[in-house]
Amino acid sequence: MNGMWTRNGAIRFAAIIALSMILLAASVPAATIQLPRGTEVKVKFVAAAKVSSGNLAKDVPVLFTLAEPVIIGGETLVEAGATGTAKVVEVEKAGKAGKAGYIKVAFVDLDPKGIYQTADKAKIKLTGEVENKGKGKKFISMLFIAGLFIKGGQGEIPANVVYTAKVAESITLENK
């Protein structure tokens, strides 16, 4: 009987320890870290989406991905490959008589990706712009009467280039 009591006592003790560990783990707050305003993030536009004045209109969203992880204090807060949104803020299509096209996009936000997330699943707000003016052909169009029908080049933002955006507002991320 005494050996039975020891086994039952050991089981109870183990159960109390296990329950205490579970309760202790549940009461430890998640690790939080601040992503400060002005932090630079390196992004690339999605290769499949051609960012051109010839095929986009004002206020159209344009997708991009994070080209490099966002690292603060040795911690990767947002993993490379996270997706974000930019928006066309100005656009002019190329026109006849050699008029060049123009496009400007503004970075809007970035979805957190990785073990750090915002408390309310909010996106990270960004700031920054990229613009491009196409090649004009006015001189050529002036040389020839048929030049009135020569169209200028579209403004295009290459997808294979890394651009810099910045965090617009400081935000707290939690290790989930």
Image: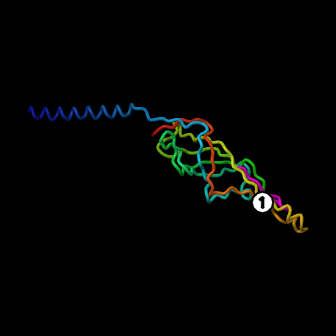
Position of residue 13 in the picture relative to residue 126 (left or right): left
Give the image location of residue 30, x and y in percent: 44, 35
- Looking at the picture, how far across and down is residue 61, in whole percent? 66, 50
**Residue 38 lies in quadrant:** top right
At x 64%, y 44%, the residue is 108
Q: Position of residue 35 (x, y in %)?
A: 55, 37
Q: Which residue is mark 1?
A: 135
Say which of 92 and 7 sits in front. Answer: 92
Residue 41 sits in quarter: top right
Answer left or right for 98 relative to 80: right
Give the overall secondary structure of the magenta segment: loop
Q: Is residue 126 magenta?
A: no
Quadrant for the N terminus in the image: top left
Magenta stretch encompasses residue 101: yes
Total numbered circles: 1
Q: Who's the residue at 26% across and 33% down the image?
A: 17
Q: Position of residue 54 (x, y in %)?
A: 74, 59
Magenta-tinted stretch: 95-104
- The C terminus sits in image quarter: top left
- Disc 1 crowd, CA 10 A, few/some/many (<14, 14-19, 20+): some
Closest to the observer: 104 or 3? Answer: 104
Colour scheme of this structure image?
rainbow
Q: Amino acid at mark 1?
A: Lys
